[in-house]
Amino acid sequence: MGQITYRPYAPRDFKALSDIINITWGHEKSYSLTTAVRLSNAYLRLCLTEQTFAQVALYNEKPIGVIMGNSFRTSHKTLKYRLHAGWALLMLSLTAEGRRAWHFYEEIDQIYEKLLSRQTRDYEGELTFLAIHPGYRGLGIGKELYRRFSGYMNSENIQHFYVFTDTTCNYGFYEGQKMLLCGTEEVTLPVNGSPEQFLFFIYENFTGRT
């Protein structure tokens, strides 16, 4: 059995983490290989522009999981990340399939904005992204990554943060971490030309609550 370790994100982790996104969301089942890779790259690049905290889980030094979050109190030094994200989106937009793929995510962003606009609380942070390679789930990696993110929120003196998720993800994980469901939105979106039903959620957490 190898060793699972944790450390801050490093640029050398990008390829492995993009692959995890591709596998987790099954991009290759919906798009060509080229579009699937470009879509995963673009999504990860945009996540990196929003983060002030990023921790990676490694198995024998291979990235197998990641958590990213955002303290609204901390300034973002993201010019390099934004340039990389712009290039990734440009590559994705080179084909009609790529443009359709990104439009799907733009629609999801609009749903997230709607969910957030309904909240009365002023949040101070966001859990931006959490993903574990399917082959390493059930080992407590997600819980450990969440614990580290929660510790970061505490260090920033942040009591209220949120996360968006949906029925394509293990949203029950957040309830297991004592986050509270505070909004839902049911939406029909086109997938491979066919309509599919999705439920989107916003959960909130209070780091000072026991």
Image: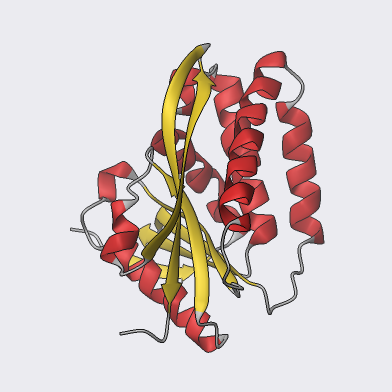
Q: Would you identify the image quadrant in which residue 173 lies?
A: bottom left
Q: Give the quadrant of the C terminus.
A: bottom left
Question: In the figure, is residue 77 to the left or right of 143?
Answer: right
- Residue 51's x, y, as percent? 63, 64
Location of residue 179 by image quarter = bottom left
Residue extending farthest top = 193
Q: Residue furthest left?
A: 1
Residue 125 screen position, x and y as percent = 58, 71
Q: Residue 36: x percent and y percent?
A: 55, 26
Q: Position of residue 151 (x, y in %)?
A: 44, 81
Tell me the residue at 34%/60% (across/down): 174
Could one spot residue 141 in this view of the protein? no
Q: With respect to residue 6, does 36 lie above or below?
A: above
- Residue closer to the observer: 40 or 151: 151
- Horizontal relation, residue 60 to residue 199: left or right: left
Q: Quadrant of the N terminus?
A: bottom left
Number of labels in the image equals: 0
Colouring = secondary structure
Most foreground residue, 18 or 115: 115
- 22 over 127 or under it: above or below: above
Query: Residue at (54%, 82%) from the top-left corner?
Result: 158
Task: Tell whether 111 sits left or right of 80.
Answer: left
Q: Is residue 34 above or below residue 178?
A: above
Query: On screen, 187 above or below 200?
Result: above
Could you say which quadrant of the image residue 96 lies in? Answer: top right
Query: Is residue 171 something one can see in this rendering?
Result: yes
